C-alpha cells in the first residue's frame, strides 16, 4: 500500500497547480483515460439462464431492465434508420443516408413456382431486417474518463456508441436460444455535445472494465498507468480515513462499512493483494436525450477488482472484487442508507 514518492510528489504538484491566487482549489479534473473503447453488456438473460443464483446474474449486473432496454433500442434503431442520427463506420467514415438500407436490411433472391398453369418458375426478392433490439445485448462506448482528485469521483464523457449485433440461434438439444458472443459492432453513433439527458434509462447498472494490457476481452486505449495510480491514491486516502469504503456482507451487496483499522489490515489478514488490482467495476445511473439518443452516465461508485492467482502455480484464476467506494446516495435493498464522507 506504499505509494511511490514520485507519484505522491506528482499529485502534490498537480494540486498546487489547481490552487487559485486566493488559495482556493479550482474544480479541475485529472485525466484517467482518453478515447477509451470498451464493451458493456446490457442484457444478462443468457448468463442468468445458466446460473440464476450467481451474483454475476443479479438484476443490475451488466443489465438494463428489459422494459427500458427494448424501448430505448427500438427508438435508437428507428432514428438511425431514418437518418436522424450521426452515423459512421467503425473506422470513422460517414455513412450516407442513401446507404443506410445496406446496414439494416438484407435482400435475398428466391425462386418460386407459380400456382397456376403453366406452373413456370420465377424469381422474387425478399427483403428482411438484419437485426432488431433482441439482437443487441452489448454496446461499445468511446469515452473520455477523468476524476476529481479530492473525492476520487469518476466522470465519463461519452463520445460515441456502437450497438453490437449478436445472432440468435435455436439449440434443438437444450431447447433454448443461444446468443452469439460477443457479436459484431454495426456502426458508431456520434453524440452531440449539446444533448440534454432528461429520460432515465436505468437507475443502476454495474459493469466491469479491465485495464491491464494483457487481458482478454475488448478494451482499447485504456491508460493503465493512470488507472493504477488512481487506485494507489484511492487506497492511500482510504488508509487515512478520508473516504468510506464497503465490502460484501452476507449477500452480494457491498453494504458493509469498513473501519480504517480493518482496511489497513485487509492485506495482512486476508489473501488479497492491492498490487494485483487490474479491473475497475462501476456502479452507474444512465439517462438519455430522447432527440439525439445520447446516453449520459453518472458514476455512483467504483470497485477495485483484484486479479486472483494460484499461490502455488501462479496461474491466473479470475477476478475478485475487493471494496466499493460510493460518491453519491446509493439504493441498497434491505439495508441502511450508506454513510458517505463528503
Image (tube, rainbow, N blue to C red):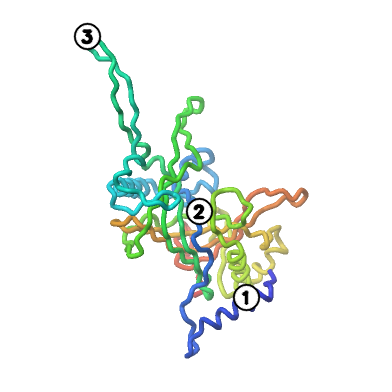
Q: Please tell me which residue is depicted at 67% across the width and 53% down the height of the picture.
A: 308
Q: Are marks 2 and 1 in contact (CB under 8 Å)?
A: no
State the image quarter where residue 286 is shown. bottom left
First in sequence: mark 2 vs mark 1: 2
Residue displayed at 51% across by 25% down: 173
Work out how far the residue at label 2 is from the one at label 1, CA to CA, in angstroms: 33 Å
- Residue under label 3: 117
| Percent coordinates x, y for residue 220 in the rendering | 54, 55
* Label of residue 38 in the image: 2
Query: In the rendering, at what x and y percent does residue 146 appear?
Result: 50, 68
Report crowding for label 3: few under 14, some 14 to 19, many 20 or more residues within 10 A (C-alpha): few
Q: Which residue is mark 1?
A: 240
Total numbered badges shown on the rendered structure: 3
Disc 2 element:
strand
Q: Residues within 10 Å of mark 2 (few under 14, many from 20)?
A: many
What residue occupies the far right of the structure in this picture? 312
Sequence order check: which comes first, mark 2 or mark 3? 2
Q: Nearer the viewer, residue 174 or 99?
A: 99
Camera-nearest label, 2 or 1: 2
Q: Secondary structure at mark 1?
A: loop
Indicate the quadrant containing the N terminus: top left, top right, bottom left or bottom right. Answer: bottom right
For the residues labelled 2 and 3, say whether their Cβ atoms are less than 8 Å apart: no
Count residues near mark 1 (Cα–Cα under 10 Å), then give few for <14, some for 14-19, many for 20+: few
123 with respect to 304 (left or right):
left
Identify the residue at the far left of this view: 116
Amino acid at each position: 500500500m506504499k505509494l511511490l514518492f514520485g507519484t505522491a510528489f506528482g499529485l502534490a504538484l498537480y494540486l498546487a497547480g489547481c490552487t487559485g491566487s486566493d488559495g482556493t482549489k479550482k474544480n479541475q479534473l485529472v485525466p484517467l483515460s482518453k478515447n477509451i473503447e470498451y464493451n458493456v453488456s446490457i442484457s444478462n438473460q443468457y448468463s442468468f439462464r445458466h446460473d440464476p443464483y450467481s451474483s454475476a446474474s443479479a438484476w443490475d449486473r451488466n443489465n438494463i431492465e428489459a422494459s427500458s432496454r427494448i424501448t430505448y433500442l427500438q427508438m435508437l434503431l428507428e432514428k438511425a434508420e431514418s437518418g436522424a442520427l450521426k452515423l459512421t463506420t467503425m473506422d470513422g467514415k460517414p455513412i450516407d443516408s442513401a446507404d443506410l438500407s445496406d446496414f439494416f436490411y438484407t435482400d435475398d433472391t428466391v425462386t418460386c413456382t407459380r400456382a397456376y398453369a403453366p406452373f413456370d418458375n420465377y424469381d422474387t426478392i425478399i427483403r428482411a431486417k438484419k437485426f432488431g433490439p433482441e439482437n443487441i445485448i452489448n454496446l461499445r462506448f468511446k469515452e473520455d474518463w477523468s476524476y476529481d482528485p479530492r473525492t476520487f469521483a469518476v466522470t465519463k464523457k461519452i463520445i460515441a456508441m456502437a450497438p453490437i449485433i449478436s445472432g440468435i440461434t435455436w439449440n434443438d438439444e437444450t431447447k433454448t436460444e443461444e446468443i452469439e458472443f460477443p457479436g459484431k459492432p454495426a456502426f458508431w453513433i456520434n453524440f452531440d455535445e449539446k444533448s440534454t439527458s432528461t429520460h432515465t434509462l436505468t437507475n443502476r447498472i454495474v459493469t466491469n472494465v479491465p485495464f491491464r494490457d494483457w487481458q482478454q476481452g475488448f478494451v482499447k486505449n485504456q491508460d493503465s498507468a493512470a488507472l493504477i495510480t488512481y487506485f494507489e491514491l484511492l487506497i492511500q486516502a482510504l488508509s487515512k480515513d478520508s473516504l468510506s469504503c464497503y465490502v460484501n456482507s452476507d449477500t452480494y451487496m457491498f453494504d458493509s462499512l469498513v473501519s480504517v483499522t480493518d482496511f489497513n489490515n485487509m492485506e495482512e489478514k486476508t489473501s488479497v493483494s492491492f498490487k494485483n488490482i487490474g479491473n475497475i467495476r462501476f456502479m452507474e445511473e444512465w439517462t438519455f436525450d430522447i432527440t439525439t439518443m445520447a446516453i449520459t452516465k453518472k458514476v455512483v461508485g467504483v470497485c477495485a477488482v483484484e486479479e486472483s492467482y494460484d499461490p502455488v502455480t501462479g496461474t491466473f484464476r479470475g477476478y475478485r472484487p475487493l471494496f466499493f467506494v460510493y460518491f453519491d446516495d446509493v439504493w441498497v435493498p434491505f439495508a441502511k442508507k450508506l454513510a458517505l464522507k463528503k
